[in-house]
Image: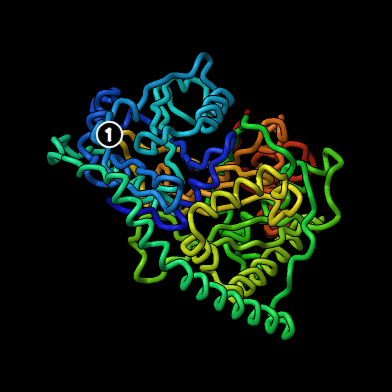
Amino acid sequence: MQQLTGPDAMFLHMELKGFPMHIGGVSIYDQSTSPGGLVRFKDILGMFESRLDRSPIFRRKLAEVPFNLDQPYWVGDPDFDLEFHVRHIALPKPGDWRQLCIQVARLHARPLDRNRPLWEAYIIEGLHDLEGVPPGSFALYLKVHHAAIDGASGVQFFGAFNDIGPQPEPISQPPLWQPAAPPGTGKLLLKAYTNNLRKPAQMLRMARDLLSSRKRVREGLSRGEFSELGEIPTTRFNRKLTPHRVVGATKFDFEDIRNIKSSVEGATVNDVMLAIVSGALRKYLAGKDELPERSLVTGCPVNVRDEGEKDKDGNMVGMMTTALCTDIDDPLQRLRGVHQQAVNAKAYMQAQGSRMMVDFSETVPAGIQALLIQATALTGLAEKNLVMNTTITNVPGAPYQLYMCGAQLIDSFGIGPLAPGMGLFHTVNSMVMKNKGAITLAFICCREVMPDPELYTRCIEESFAELQLATTPRKKQSRSKRGIAPRLSAVPRPRPAKKRRAR
């Protein structure tokens, strides 16, 4: 029996009707590389079964404390059924990219069953008409509750059923597993009483840390070390949301992103991806005559694990908010502005305390956390008091080629959760596919807010093309004989992004 940490439990409290709090990922595999050129569903089931002991996430479920008096516990599920969690479906013909995105969006919109281990995997066949995807390929859509995993620890969980070579490990029977008896109500209440006795002292420490944080921020502002963001504009992404979702993604060569990064001194790959999203948002909103005069603001989850917590499961994240410079028209100047704003945001977060969110969730009693989150959603405060317009998270993948049951990973992208007042979530994934570095930018949005995700995908590709053109030497431009970006017919692109169609 293991109690959830405050940050883990907060994602349970944040889960409201129409807002499931799981993270997901789609991976596409080419089964022609597997032994015999065929991967059967029973092979995948056998592989999962043989590796259940590699992560506790597979077979543990929640044990709630009565009346929400304390954080829940993880306990072993004595009725664990692998075939409930690993499912087999197929796309209807013609099995194109749009249908895959529709299917994934529907699956991602459904909450997980809290009476079972909080994960599900779907093997999706029928991928007959995806550009650059060999015939016979299949997809794996995996979703895991955010209470059980974050982006950093998710990479480790994903590695449990992937190999680094085309020859799959022999399937063997896992060690006999017998879960401990679940705790009784009396034991849970006694532990809750003991834990809550510590809360007053913890809250005093948090109040002291908060005062110190405010002092550091005031001093930093007075010395001009950083600045505050100011008023955050309201956009269509921050209004009342529905439970319906749309999904899209597009892919870039890592070398192209690195070349753009090198054009601005001190810039990072993450800055480039923020600038691409900034340009896409600017195009999308301007096309609807809804572009605010003030810059949009994004939240960027930050891993706050220290050296001693690198192998710790669960969530250890803070949130950095930074301006996207959507008020700047020139793409190169926008990249420079994004880089400066990111430096400013990191300095502000360091002064404020990067672990403030972690400390809050560990200190405030579970029942109060749940009431605060529910009240914020029901009263519309989330839409009225914006903290950010969107979220962009960067999740690095394995720096080597992966395989599942011998099938080579040829494409992959991640999907995050939406929350009241925050209806657009971007995920940046770096990975090695076909022994070449790539970066995928994916997004999930409320369907009523973004009824045209294919248009937004095109805005992302155009934003990349403009940024690449602005940062590529003219000699390289003149030698380019490759394609042009959509809606930029007069603008040559040295190396276009690999295009996809979204729903």
Could you say which quadrant of the image residue 474 lies in?
bottom right
The relative height of residue 304 versus residue 458 in the rendered view (above or below) is below
The relative height of residue 57 versus residue 325 in the rendered view (above or below) is above
Q: Position of residue 272 (x, y in %)?
A: 63, 58
- Secondary element under disc 1, as helix, strand or loop, is loop
Q: Is residue 44 visible?
A: no
Q: Position of residue 401 (x, y in %)?
A: 36, 46
Q: Position of residue 404 (x, y in %)?
A: 31, 36
The relative height of residue 38 versus residue 305 in the rendered view (above or below) is above
Q: Is residue 157 visible?
A: yes
Q: Position of residue 465 (x, y in %)?
A: 69, 47
> Front-most of 407 and 246?
246
Residue drawn at point x = 78 percent, y = 57 percent: 295
Could you say which quadrant of the image residue 168 lies in?
top left
Category of crowding for the residue at label 1, using alpha-carbon neighbours closer than 10 angstroms: few (below 14), some (14–19), many (at least 20): many
> Front-most of 251 and 219?
219
* Left or right of 199, for residue 357: right
> Front-most of 247 and 430?
247
Which residue carries the number 1 mark?
Answer: 405
Residue drawn at point x = 33 percent, y = 26 percent: 84
* Colouring method of the image: rainbow
Residue type at numbered disc 1: Cys
What quarter of the picture does the C terminus occupy? top right
Q: How many marks?
A: 1
Taking the view exactly as shown, the residue that stands out farthest to the top is: 93
